[in-house]
Image: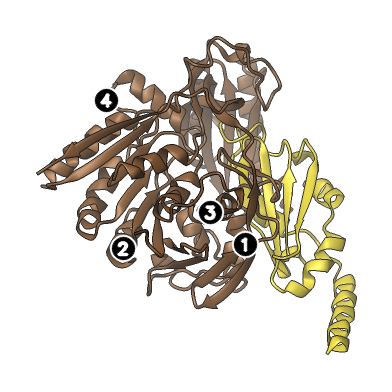
Chain colours: A yellow, B brown
Amino acid sequence: MKLGDIAHSRAGDKGNISNLSLIPYNELDYLFLKKQITEEKVKSYFNERIKGSVTRYELPHLHAFNFVLEAALYSGVTRSLALDPHGKTLSSIFLMMEIDPEEYRKYRHLSLSKTSDNH
Amino acid sequence: MSKRSIRIGSGAGYSGDLIQPAVQLAEEGTIDYLIFECLAERTIALAQLQKLKDPQLGYDPLLEERIKAVLPICVKKNIKIISNMGAANPIAAVDKIIELAKQLKIKKLKVVAISGDDVINAINDQDYKLIESGDSISVLKNQLVSANAYLGLRPIVEALKLDADIIITGRVADPAIFMAPLFYEFNWDIDNSDLLGKATAMGHLLECAAQVCGGYFNDLDKKQVPNPEAIGFPIAKVTSDGHYTITKVPNSGGIINKATCTEQLLYEIHDPKNYITPDVIADFSSVRFRELASNQVEISGATGANKTGKLKVSLGYKDGYIGEGQMSYGGYQAKERASLALKIIKSKLHHLGLSKYDANYDLIGVNSLSKDQVEESPNEIRIRVALRTKTKEEAITVGQQVEALYTNGPAAGGGASKSVKEIIAVQSILIDENLPTIQLTTKTIES
């Protein structure tokens, strides 16, 4: 199971910093992503690509996250030798991250039963 | 009496954007303002180089085509135009617009240029620290091409008070060209951080045009976009009591919903609580979107805190060259032959004394975008070699070496291409907001 099965993303660039939004298709999955897609996990997923730190900002009203990746663009669009100097394609590469389907199934089961308890 | 509500159309998301959707906006969008955001981070440095060659140039290369396409409609429908297409030379851009308007037999027009964002002389006598590298600005002194401060919305509001039909700026904060009409039309307090924060969210959603309407969004079954070949550009409907709705021309292609708005709200921002602009520190952390009807989304919840009193200045500087060459391999053992070709080029460039430079050796189709290795040999593959060199001659060599794989390299390489470009790199400094001397220049046609 891939991250892209349950969420979407868009990449932006400013200088040598990339930002990746992460937005679940279903608002219910916000807390699952909050637990699973940590700063450490994103940093190690992109491995040597990101030379700097990863910061995750949470937007609970929008059920979305914004990941800010420092020193991620080979010194930025103006000097980069990369084929995609803006790092535009990083969003869809992000969505290839593996999700544990068992964990996801358990989470969904729990949150759905919680939701029905509330009614 | 001031208006109760206005409609602002976004006519371009970048310098090279499509022109037809802007024409559609002017014709069918029932808009009061048509805004063109056309200035990327380093565009102004390139424009500055052009201006050095010809003092009548240095504005957006598509200005003429855009203005010709929309001006007659805008004059007829009384739509005001605001744009940063002035780039490095807003006054020359305004002269050009007057010339075009005369050709189009327009009888009455007031065009205002806003200049003063160019601070290259003003920053001369002080030392500044570069934000990105932490070095002193003096390390760039001989390479510096341009220094342009991001101005805020105040001069644009001033220009609107002069009753301008068209306002042309150089470097301003992207959202500011969308925000200014609200503060002018509704007579809003220009120091009210909450109003500025809300208006910034609207400007930010609009500044990339189609990107909030299903452009750059389509992911087939996961994110469907109707009629993707005819995506319309966005319109913000804003009321004087601060209600914001994003919509587009009826029957145009594309889609506006919570998902498109959320993607665009977070596009190119870092901390959503602290989005720093010349006018306000906008806070998007409590923004909410509500789908009112098909392709109509209400934004609420943005706010802001007092501006920092500093302006960011983009410094454009010459930083060598990038030389590039590409060649394709297909069919039997394509990946192996492509890998051999890269190895040969690497060795040749080493013997030519170029291995001291940063280089990329890509197998397009395997590892050019991410470092994931594709296990089996793809049916076709393209090699790409790119080097950042000091001189133009060295950069030319890169493409020549790759092209010569035709007769010297592994079997059956095809479709060579090569390029050389001069690097205009960008770094930034912060200056006091009062440093730029802002000037409004008015040109008119009167019947």
Q: Position of residue B447 (x, y in %)?
A: 9, 44
**Mark earlier in primary sequence (3, 1):** 3
Q: Mark 4 near mark 1, Cβ–Cβ under 8 Å?
A: no
Q: Please identify, in this view, whether the residue under mark 3 or under mark 1 is nearer the observer.
A: 3
The chain to which mark 4 is attached is B
Q: Position of residue B345 (x, y in %)?
A: 61, 27
**Mark earlier in primary sequence (2, 4):** 2
The chain to which mark 2 is attached is B
Residue highlighted by disc 4: B56
Tell me the SS state at disc 1.
helix
For the residues labelled 3 and 1, the Cα–Cα distance comes to 16 Å
Answer with left or right where residue A107 lies relative to residue B186. Answer: right
**Mark earlier in primary sequence (2, 3):** 2
Q: Residue furthest front?
A: B1
**Mark earlier in primary sequence (4, 1):** 4
User: What residue appears at the point 26 percent right and 53 percent down from the top-left corner?
Assistant: B70
The chain to which mark 3 is attached is B
Tell me the SS state at disc 2.
helix
Say which of B334 and B22 sits in front: B22
As drawn, the label of residue B199 is: 3
Tell me which amino acid carries mark 1: Thr
| Dots 2 and 3 on the same chain | yes
Say which of B397 and B192 sits in front: B192
As drawn, the label of residue B24 is: 2
In the rendered view, tell whether residue A39 sits above or below residue B254.
above
The chain to which mark 1 is attached is B
Residue highlighted by disc 1: B262
Number of marks: 4
Answer with left or right where residue B4 lies relative to residue B150. Answer: left
Say which of B361 and B115 sits in front: B115
Tell me the SS state at disc 4.
loop
